[in-house]
Amino acid sequence: MWNDNAPIYRQLKERVIGMMLDGLLKPGDALPSVRQVAADYQLNPITVSRAYQELVDETLVEKRRGMGMYVTEGAVEKLLASERERFLREEWPAMVERIRRLGLDMEKLLRATQPGSAG
């Protein structure tokens, strides 16, 4: 469930972000309570709180006093913009280099990924 390559709070934060990007958590939706997540995943509540606090710091989630944490309006758009930028900066150059090294034709690759294509 958790891997050793990154701190658990960061992995938990990434899971919540993934749920937002996949539409499983929408603006206005409540996040499960810190206690609930800690119990469900057998985590220290401080670990869960740290993940949630980072989401608050990035204005993806807001803390409503006495009510819990809620996904903010515009969170998904903000995430998409930052994830796209990160992909183009970090992942895409490595993919392009791998494509070049393997001698693959970009046009053929694009055609092969079109819906209905036989590949």
Image (tube, rainbow, N blue to C red):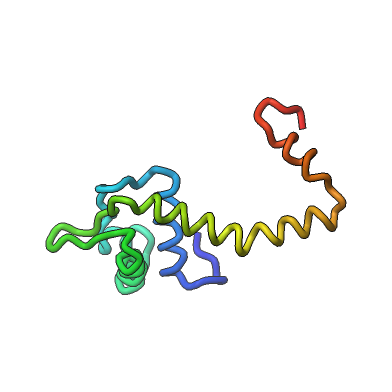
Q: Residue at x 74, y 35 (%)?
A: 112
| Residue 9 in which image quadrant | bottom left
Query: x, y percentage for residue 19?
Result: 41, 49
38, 60: nearer the viewer: 60
Q: Residue furthest right?
A: 103
Q: Residue at x 30, y 65 (%)?
A: 56
65, 105: nearer the viewer: 105
Q: Can you say which quadrant of the picture contains the C terminus?
A: top right
Q: Residue at x 52, y 71 (%)?
A: 6
Query: x, y percentage for residue 107?
Result: 78, 40
Position of residue 24 in the picture relative to residue 86 (left or right): left
Q: How many marks?
A: 0
| Residue 45 in which image quadrant | bottom left
Question: Does residue 16 sit above or below 56 in this rendering?
Answer: above
119, 42: nearer the viewer: 119
Position of residue 108 in the picture relative to residue 90 (left or right): right
Q: Residue at x 84, y 58 (%)?
A: 101
Question: Does residue 102 sit above or below 65 in this rendering?
Answer: above
Q: Residue furthest top?
A: 116
Question: Does residue 117 sit above or below 61 in this rendering?
Answer: above
Query: x, y percentage for residue 20?
Result: 39, 50
Position of residue 118 in the picture relative to residue 65 (left or right): right
20, 94: nearer the viewer: 94
